[in-house]
């Protein structure tokens, strides 16, 4: 062990997080930066997953991606191909990427490129498609596939041309620090950050040499998409936590993710190993006509934001969203963040929250504290219909299963030779 104690190692993890300098550099085809995306390969959210264990929405996303890539001409042929095992599945987390909800990412989908300037480490995430019937929630109609093609052919290249005009890329820390004071918690609410991104990128879009029609379409899409910044924040959280994971010691959670079948966590002192337990189903509010009976179990890599200490961990930063996720009012938001503080070892001074008397967001989930208190992290999340093709039906919160932390703690005890008296 390179540190005198687990506590000292944990402080090393925190220091790496605080020193990170994530910059948004570019938007590029996924296959150009993720070499594993060659042939019939799809990335998915959460721990490793087999087709037969995927719930309907994730399978629907796979069908949509297959149609988008031109591997099949219709839904039936796509499903036969997937059932026959002709497509290889890889977790996003295994290739420096993250993906929301189903997490399905294919070779020709554009991804944001976020680099930590401290160590040149990079992370990737696909682009937010907007709301309604979208691939990430399992929809795969012609409307969904055509939107994906527009994102590939118009939105992605436009953003790339704009970002390349910014010397050194866009400083994400600056946007995040501003947006958290404007009421974003960066998982369920990204309205402020998305507006700030739009404000910063438009001058460069105007000088990118885009055809007028495409310029109008891109600006309108960004203006209409309140959650556009979420995917940038996911890649940012991924690169920051991967940078902290180089410590390879201690008991700090470096990844939280789920695939609709299992919830998985990674821990700084336990390398790339997943610790999993059956995933829970979110509690929350449902759109008109839907109820909890329609909900799919929890899924998505977006919980990487809670790993970084925002999202549900920073509920108090976004009192405007508490009713949307069904957590009650302002007092409940305070209670949630106060509770999350009990399982973390620090606060992030770079993310001061005005509505929390300017305390920094929670930072450093310690698996020892989770098991000792029985308090598990709160995740803010969207809710997908359990049937493929329907899409999002609500939003809410979900807890990480305690079993993930219990298994990780046993493994950590074994690593450090600790035995119970």
Image: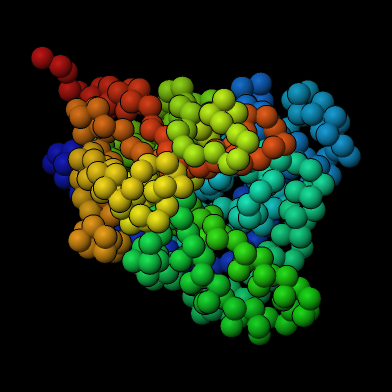
- Residue at the spot x=23%, y=40% of the render? 339
Q: How many marks?
A: 0
Question: Residue 166 location, x and y as percent?
Answer: 54, 79
Furthest toward the top, the residue is 421
Question: Residue 363 location, x and y as percent?
Answer: 27, 49
Q: Quadrant of the C terminus?
A: top left
Residue 211 located left or right of residue 310: right
Residue 147 located left or right of residue 301: right
Could you say which is closer to the camera, residue 208 or residue 139?
Answer: 139
Q: Can residue 281 be seen in this view?
A: yes
- Residue at the spot x=55%, y=61% of the render? 226
Residue 269 located left or right of residue 326: left
Q: In the picture shown, does residue 139 fall above or below 315?
A: above
Quadrant assignment, res 369? top left
Color scheme of the displayed model: rainbow
Could you say which is closer to the camera, residue 241 or residue 133?
Answer: 133
- Residue at the spot x=70%, y=32% of the render? 388
Q: Quadrant of the N terminus?
A: top left
């Amino acid at each position: 062990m390179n540190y005198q104690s687990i506590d000292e190692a944990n402080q090393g993890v925190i220091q790496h997080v605080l020193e990170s300098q994530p910059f948004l550099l570019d938007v590029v085809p996924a296959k150009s930066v993720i070499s594993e995306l060659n042939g019939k390969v799809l990335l998915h959210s959460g721990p490793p997953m087999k087709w037969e264990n995927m719930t309907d929405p994730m399978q629907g996303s796979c069908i949509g991606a297959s149609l988008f890539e031109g591997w099949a001409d219709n839904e039936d042929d796509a499903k036969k191909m997937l059932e026959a095992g002709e497509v290889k599945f890889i977790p996003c987390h295994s290739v420096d990427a993250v993906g929301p909800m189903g997490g399905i990412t294919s070779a020709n989908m554009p991804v944001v490129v976020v680099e930590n300037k401290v160590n040149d480490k990079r992370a990737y995430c696909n682009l937010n498609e907007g709301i309604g019937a979208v691939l990430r929630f399992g929809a795969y109609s012609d409307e969904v596939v055509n939107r994906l093609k527009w994102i590939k052919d118009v939105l992605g290249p436009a953003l790339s041309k704009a970002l390349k005009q910014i010397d050194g890329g866009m400083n994400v820390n600056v946007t995040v620090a501003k947006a958290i004071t404007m009421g974003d918690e960066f998982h369920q609410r990204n309205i402020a950050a998305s507006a700030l991104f739009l404000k910063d990128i438009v001058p460069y879009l105007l000088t990118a040499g885009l055809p007028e029609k495409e310029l109008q379409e891109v600006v309108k899409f960004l203006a209409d998409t309140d959650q556009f910044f979420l995917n940038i924040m996911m890649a940012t959280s991924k690169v920051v936590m991967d940078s902290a994971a180089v410590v390879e010691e201690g008991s700090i959670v470096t990844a939280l993710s789920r695939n609709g079948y299992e919830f998985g966590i990674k821990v700084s002192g336990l390398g790339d190993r997943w610790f999993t337990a059956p995933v829970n189903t979110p509690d929350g509010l449902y759109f008109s006509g839907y109820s909890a009976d329609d909900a799919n179990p929890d899924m998505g890599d977006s919980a990487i934001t809670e790993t970084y200490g925002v999202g549900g961990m920073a509920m108090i930063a976004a009192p405007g969203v508490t009713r949307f996720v069904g957590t009650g009012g302002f007092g409940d938001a305070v209670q949630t963040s106060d509770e999350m503080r009990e399982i973390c070892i620090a606060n992030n001074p770079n993310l001061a929250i005005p509505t929390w008397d300017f305390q920094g967001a929670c930072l450093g989930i310690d698996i020892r504290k989770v098991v000792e208190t029985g308090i598990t992290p709160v995740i803010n999340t969207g809710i997908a219909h359990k049937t493929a093709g329907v899409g999002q039906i609500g939003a809410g919160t979900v807890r990480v299963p305690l079993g993930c932390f219990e298994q990780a703690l046993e493994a950590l005890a074994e690593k450090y030779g600790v035995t119970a008296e």
